Amino acid sequence: MPSEYGPRREGNNPGGIPMNGITDERQRLLPHGNGNDIMGNRQQIMGTSTTEYGAAVTLASKSQPNGMVNMASRGTMLTKSYSVHANGSASYLTPLQLGRHELYEMVPFTAVFGMQQKERNISRAFASYAADLDSMEADQFSFSQNNKRMSEAELNSRRSYTSLLLLDEFEMDAVLVTTPLIIAIFVAGISQFLVGYNTSVMNSPSSVVFQGHNTFQWSVAVSAFAVGGPFGAIMAGSLVDTRGRRGALTINTYTFLGGGILQTFATNMLFITIARFIIGFASGFSSVLVPIFLGELAPPTLRGTLGTLTQFCLVTGIFVSDLLAFPLATESSWRILFSVTIILSVAQIACFPFLVESPRWLLHRDKKSRRARLIIKKLRGLRHDHEIETEVNHFISASHAQSCGDAEERTNSGGAFVAMINDDRMWKLLVCSLILQMAQQLCGINAVFYYSTMFFDGLIENPLIGTAIVGGVNVAATYVALFLMESSNRRTLILWSAGGMLVSCIGLVVCLLGYFDKMASLFFVVTFVSFFEIGLGPM
């Protein structure tokens, strides 16, 4: 039987997913009962239209497609339901496809740090709903064939098995990583690694690069990185729409390469400053591009994981630059320290022939794009045309649902920004987002990663050790933040983060005034970085 008429994988083992918590989650979010109860509860909890699922329930008793076998007689096959696509046309979807359809609409097309828990909750909710829908259809089918309703025990058994089967399928999406997706993750991860690496690479060799420069020259060279970042972020917003995600990533990589060559072979501080501006431009560009690119390639159940991965790439880049400073931050080897940007950019370029374009971007330009369908086939490991078309419909419907405003054409960055400004419900959220972004950049964290070696000089015996400790704590705190974001709400974490950073700043000032031992200053710098990473940093 083709996979159009059931799950993509067969077998009686639903993946070994434990029942603990699933039944409770179903009872809390989607209580059993008649179709109207389920519809009303879904609308109340999810806040979304019931058009698709309402059509599925009310039309479920209609004739089935030719050749379709009901799960009641086979035991391993999920029935089809009538549903309504975004364009208003009716089609048949399995309960699994219904769940995947909603996942695409509910999870944004961006790879965002700390989104795994939300993805799991949505998956459980829709698996429970689809299982309820399937059991209702099975009961109706049994009644139409035998004029007899299924018993409560039979319904519960079918419901539990179907829910586990669907969760297993969603879990497969999270672990099924194809070669094109691996290549995309590798290339995008290097970009974020280079952002972190170049954030901190100027920290350690300040005393060995072109000896004789003054503090002002060095400060201008270091800060040029931060000056170039906003320009790159602004440019990325337009290029990702006009040149495509892959084309924009190509431009970004060559920008990193050009800046790395200029910085490595610089003859004076002026060239270092220009190179830092170019690399900062590429870093700002990458910070906008990478979450979009990976989010549009990955299935919904994998986007939060990839967002976390890119954040770890960034903080790991900072830490690696601190570690490489031990052997390379010398008068004879500092150019090797800068050449890492060249080496990694060349590695990215070598992967370009195997790098795919975003299917969402291609479908936005042409809904009949054959190239987009070929890419989706490779990304998802699909074999049949009907599976590909179903996935294409998920992309198109989710893009329409997540667009700003009523017009689907408002998917470019400029139109989206104007739409948010004109929307009374959105502009307050926009202001809050801007304030949080400003707080993130102006809180003083950049001074730690730019100048910690100079700061620790005279406070501890080897300043490089202090800088490396701060970089290592930065990575560890990011890992801790991942678990805190799953157990605590964002507002609480931001308040604790800001409060902890304030106390750390006060303690650091007291140390510098001589009231505590100088080594205590290292402790307060570490706590400052730790509190940043659990709140303002990844938010």
Image: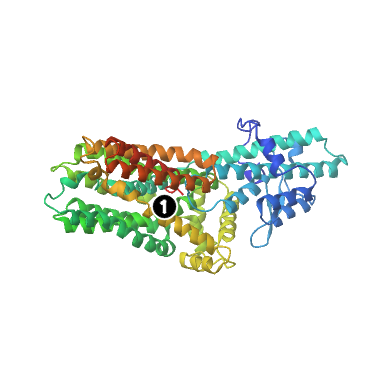
The quarter of the picture where residue 47 lies is bottom right
Q: Is residue 54 left or right of residue 197?
A: right
The quarter of the picture where residue 392 lies is bottom right
Q: Is residue 161 above or below residue 3?
A: above
User: Which residue is at 34% across, 46% downward?
Assistant: 193
Instruction: Decide: few, some or many residues near mark 1? Use Cα within 10 Å; few <14, some 14-19, many ≥20.
Output: many
Q: Is residue 71 visible?
A: yes
User: Which residue is at 81% across, 44% downward?
Assistant: 140
The image shows residue 298 at horizontal and vertical percentages of 49, 48
The image shows residue 464 at horizontal and vertical percentages of 24, 38
Q: Secondary structure at mark 1?
A: helix
Is 80 or 149 nearer to us in this picture? 149
Q: Is residue 468 left or right of residue 80?
A: left
Please name the colour scheme applied to the rendered image: rainbow
The image shows residue 482 at horizontal and vertical percentages of 47, 40
Q: Is residue 76 visible?
A: no
Q: Residue furthest front?
A: 515
The image shows residue 426 at horizontal and vertical percentages of 55, 62
The residue under label 1 is which amino acid type? Val
Q: Is residue 167 left or right of residue 284?
A: right
Q: Which residue is mark 1?
A: 290
